[in-house]
Amino acid sequence: MGYFLAVSAFRTDDTDAVCRAIVGYCMANGVGCGVEASPGHANEATDAVVYAPVDGWTCVLWPAYFNIHDFPLCETLSKDQGLAVSTVHVYDGDFWEHLFLDQGRALHRFSSWPDCFAENPEEAAKAKAEWQGEPSQLACFLGIDPASISRYLVHLPLPPPVPTAPPLRKPWPLSWFCRKEEPASPPVPPKAYGSDAFAIEDFWVFTDFWAKLGIRYPDPPDQNIACVLRMDSSFTRKLPTI
């Protein structure tokens, strides 16, 4: 089983307002949601962890498999609360997607593998165009240089096919037995920027991307917690999906 992650950052210091908005959204869609009395024992299957604001951003780490629900939720909360919101989700550990909104208006939309589910070349081309992640509008809004984030916004190639059988080994020249061969070092995956913590092919690179936006990913996840919101497990069926 791969990794399914969703995390959002709301541009506000008012964590209470963020919590009220999340609870209201859930209740409006028929999903029970309330503050958990023991925030130190979060249940990743049902709990949204809300963190104390850092540098003006309040982060929310959503329950597992919330990656199909975060975009609609953030679109609604951004519009209703008049907030800027950046939200990221990961699908099966294969790729990450980003949506940035201001007052409900999308300023940036990116996927590292936009044509993952495309069934033909036409669908693939359309998906790549829709999720290309052109950075100028987002950079202008945040007052940063587009060049500081553009290298993150690349569409990765398809994963290499899994070989069905190991390749046949070619005979070694006799001279090879006369010297000791050192094992070849695996190639170092490239990084978007030299100071990054993660390679461009690693989905965690979104945390480096976030850092350029001024958002700090909540790590370690069990610290700086403001509150925990526990959702009814029916959220998987009742909340809007992308």
Image (spheres, helix red, strand yellow):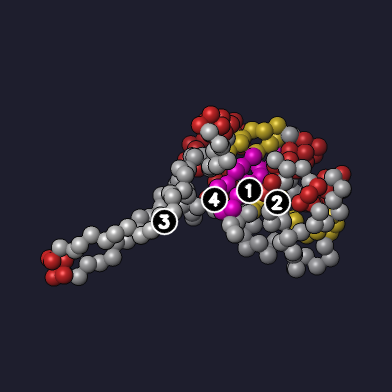
Distance between the alpha carbons at the discs numbered 2 and 3? 34 Å
Please, what secondary structure does the residue beneath circle 1 have?
Answer: strand
Mark 1 = which residue? 89
Locate the C terminus and report the quarter of the image it occupies: top right
Distance between the alpha carbons at the discs numbered 2 and 4? 16 Å
Residue 209 at x, y percent in the picture: 55, 46
Rendered view: 49 above or below 83: below
**Disc 2, disc 1: CB below 8 Å?**
yes
Q: How many numbered marks, from 0 up?
A: 4
First in residue order: circle 2 vs circle 4: 2
Mark 3 = which residue? 164
Q: Quadrant of residue 182?
A: bottom left
Rendered view: 123 above or below 160: above
Distance between the alpha carbons at the discs numbered 2 and 1? 8 Å
Q: Quadrant of residue 241?
A: top right
Span of residues in magenta: 83-99
Residue 172 part of the magenta-drawn span: no
Numbered mark located on residue 66 in the image: 2
Closer to us: 71 or 207: 71
Residue at (71, 54) in percent of width and height: 62
Residue 152 visible in the shown view = yes
- Foreground disc of the pair 1, 3: 3
Residue 20 visible in the shown view = no
In the rendered structure, the answer to whether residue 76 lies left or right of residue 206 reads: right
Mark 4 = which residue? 94
